[in-house]
Image (cartoon, grey):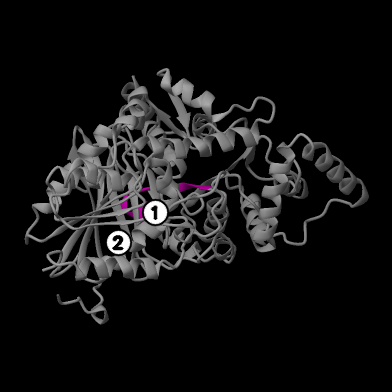
């Protein structure tokens, strides 16, 4: 399988735009490539993580684009640059977003293999999209077992903030979870969680091998990121991030090589 | 993919061979009267232009509803804008303090003013963005006002870390009285003067803006200065309270509280023309 020469790095051409989905507009950025060898759809992490992981996530997209892999990344409805109110969205909404954007990208000309790539919550949604028959492969970074795991991680950060600034009436995590289980809405890290968001989080699970060959034999790769990838993942309790632009060249190279060396993933 | 939707437009400004990306929030306004002043948000820290918890989107929408064309941009290296970026927060803060972003922000302010036929913009910055905004306001005639959220006036990042630790200690039931005692003794034993790591270049720019009577709104957390040097208070005293500076402590950290304070200040200093305001009011219902 020919490997795209890295000494012919592509000039970057990034095209931002809106794609209408469900009455709202998803913000998308297409990292266009002349004569691409493959396409990658990047599904990002949960809302509260977005601001921390954005810099390395964008740099990863540019890394791929420089090597003739066309990349499309997007914001979920109600998050970041996309329109819509967060509190009116849930995991079904975002699954629809991922599938709509993936279908759109897959239909672009010329036809090329499409790798569905996700980070944390995005990995779960990318996997669901692949399981629905869209895409040629999956690349999943730090996928959670369920969406509830994602929410609990964000909740932990909120509890850390609450306890840091309120030393008289500290509440344990169980108190917050009980409130959510009882159907109450709650503001967590600046986002208002609805009852349906919490309820659905239990139901949205990462497909597993136990459920059969959910990816239809298509290539999949799971990568568990560790703290060297911060702030791509795993900021600490109070979210004080010291590294903003880490050197992730090794991670990028490993995953790029998986794409170009896996049969059927590049033209 | 569309660049324009009903209430927003994606913009990009060419500068130094690269593109600076942003989002324009269209104002409610009548066909007869066009707004003459815009509102431009800089990145909060190193977050993308939507801000932490997408708060800047909320603010831009709010001000656009009042009739102010609002813009959110990613300075070079942040968000969707390409550019070099230091590896860590210390490096980023040093770059801000060295006015690394002043030329880019000045170019954006000029481009936006000219393209949208504005007399200029009010520039908003938070934390490091506030520092960058002060420098840009000194450099650009198109900056007509400043909204600064928790600006800082010191240089070394280790002192920021100390103040963060100090701030956290101040929340601790034991740390609070100990810190109070330390600061009280320090105040009585040493006359008030600028700390050694004060950003004197920034302070010079601040003083210039004060004397030029540029309207400035400074919003601070109501408990922010507990435990360390209060630059704003010092600067106001040393300038004999000159200038058009309003300092507004905000209780809690709600985006609505910040938005309301900024809106009230805007209405006073930069009222939207009457027919624009009437139309905006009708649009708000």
Q: Which residue lies at the image location 34% right of the left edge and 30% below the top edge?
A: A202
Q: Looking at the image, which is closer to me, A194 or B263?
A: A194
Image-quadrant location for residue B208: bottom right
10 Å crowding of disc 2: few (<14), some (14-19), many (20+): many
Q: Looking at the image, which is closer to me, A129 or B155?
A: A129
Task: Using the image, determine if residue B196 lies above or below residue A90.
Answer: below
Q: Name the quarter where the C terminus of chain A is drawn.
A: bottom left
Number of numbered labels in the structure image: 2
Is residue B181 shown left or right of residue B160? right
Q: Which residue lies at the image location 26% right of the left edge and 82% below the top edge?
A: A7
Task: Using the image, determine if residue B229 lies above or below residue B17.
Answer: above
Which residue range is magenta in the image? B111-125
Q: Position of residue A109 (x, y in %)?
A: 7, 59
- Which label is found at residue A61? 2
Q: Name the quarter where the N terminus of chain A is drawn.
A: bottom left
Q: Looking at the image, which is closer to me, B32 or B91?
A: B91
Q: Position of residue B281 (x, y in %)?
A: 37, 23
Q: Looking at the image, which is closer to me, A126 or B50?
A: A126
Q: Position of residue B25 (x, y in %)?
A: 33, 41
Q: Which residue lies at the image location 46% right of the left edge and 43% below the top edge?
A: B52
Answer yes or no: is residue B31 visible: no
Q: Chain of mark 2?
A: A
- Which label is found at residue A54? 1
Q: Which residue lies at the image location 34% right of the left edge and 66% below the top edge?
A: A252
Is residue A141 shown left or right of residue B194? left
């Amino acid at each position: 399988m020919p490997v795209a020469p890295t000494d012919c790095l592509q000039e970057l051409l990034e095209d931002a735009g809106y794609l209408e989905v469900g009455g709202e507009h998803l913000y998308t950025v297409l990292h266009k490539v002349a004569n691409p060898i493959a396409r990658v759809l990047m599904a990002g992490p949960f809302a509260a993580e977005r601001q921390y992981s954005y810099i390395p996530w964008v740099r990863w997209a540019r890394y791929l684009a420089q090597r003739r892999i066309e990349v499309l990344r997007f914001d979920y409805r109600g998050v970041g640059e996309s329109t819509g109110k967060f509190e009116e969205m849930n995991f079904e909404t975002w699954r629809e977003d991922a599938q709509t954007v993936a279908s759109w990208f897959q239909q672009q000309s010329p036809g090329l293999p499409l790798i569905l790539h996700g980070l944390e919550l995005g990995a779960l949604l990318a996997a669901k999209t692949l399981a629905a028959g869209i895409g040629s492969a999956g690349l999943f970074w730090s996928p959670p077992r369920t969406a509830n795991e994602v929410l609990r991680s964000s909740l932990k950060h909120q509890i850390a903030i609450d306890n840091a600034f309120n030393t008289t009436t500290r509440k344990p995590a169980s108190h917050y979870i009980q409130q959510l289980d009882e159907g109450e809405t709650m503001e967590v890290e600046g986002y208002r969680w609805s009852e349906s968001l919490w309820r659905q989080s239990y139901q949205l699970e990462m497909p597993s091998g136990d459920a059969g060959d959910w990816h239809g034999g298509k290539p999949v790769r799971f990568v568990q990121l560790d703290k060297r990838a911060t702030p791509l993942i795993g900021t600490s309790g109070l979210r004080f991030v010291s590294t903003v632009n880490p050197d992730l060249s090794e991670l990028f190279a490993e995953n790029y090589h998986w794409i170009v060396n896996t049969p059927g993933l590049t033209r | 993919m569309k660049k324009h939707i009903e209430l927003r437009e994606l913009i990009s400004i060419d500068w130094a061979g690269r593109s600076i990306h942003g989002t324009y929030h269209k104002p409610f306004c009548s066909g007869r009267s066009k707004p003459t002043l815009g509102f431009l948000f800089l990145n909060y820290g190193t977050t993308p232009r939507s801000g932490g918890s997408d708060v800047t989107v909320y603010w831009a929408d709010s001000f656009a509803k009042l009739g102010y064309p609002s813009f959110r941009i990613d300075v070079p290296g942040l968000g969707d804008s390409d550019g070099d970026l230091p590896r860590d927060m210390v490096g980023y803060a040093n770059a801000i303090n060295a006015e690394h972003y002043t030329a880019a922000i000045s170019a954006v302010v000029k481009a936006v003013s000219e393209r949208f036929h504005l007399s200029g913009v009010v520039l908003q910055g938070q934390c490091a963005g506030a520092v960058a905004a002060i420098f840009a306001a000194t450099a650009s005639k198109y900056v007509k006002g400043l909204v600064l959220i928790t600006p800082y006036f010191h240089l070394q990042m280790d002192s920021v870390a100390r103040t963060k630790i100090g701030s956290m200690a101040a929340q601790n039931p034991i740390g609070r009285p100990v810190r109070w005692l330390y600061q009280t003794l320090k105040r009585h034993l040493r006359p008030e003067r600028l700390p050694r790591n004060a950003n004197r270049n920034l302070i010079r720019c601040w003083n210039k803006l004060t004397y030029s009577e540029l309207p400035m709104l400074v919003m601070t957390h109501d408990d922010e200065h507990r435990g360390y040097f209060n630059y704003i208070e010092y600067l106001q005293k040393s300038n004999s309270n000159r200038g058009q500076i309003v300092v507004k402590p905000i209780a809690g950290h709600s985006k609505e509280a910040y938005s309301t304070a900024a809106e009230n200040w805007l209405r006073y200093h930069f009222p939207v023309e009457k027919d624009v305001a009437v139309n905006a009011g009708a649009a708000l219902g």
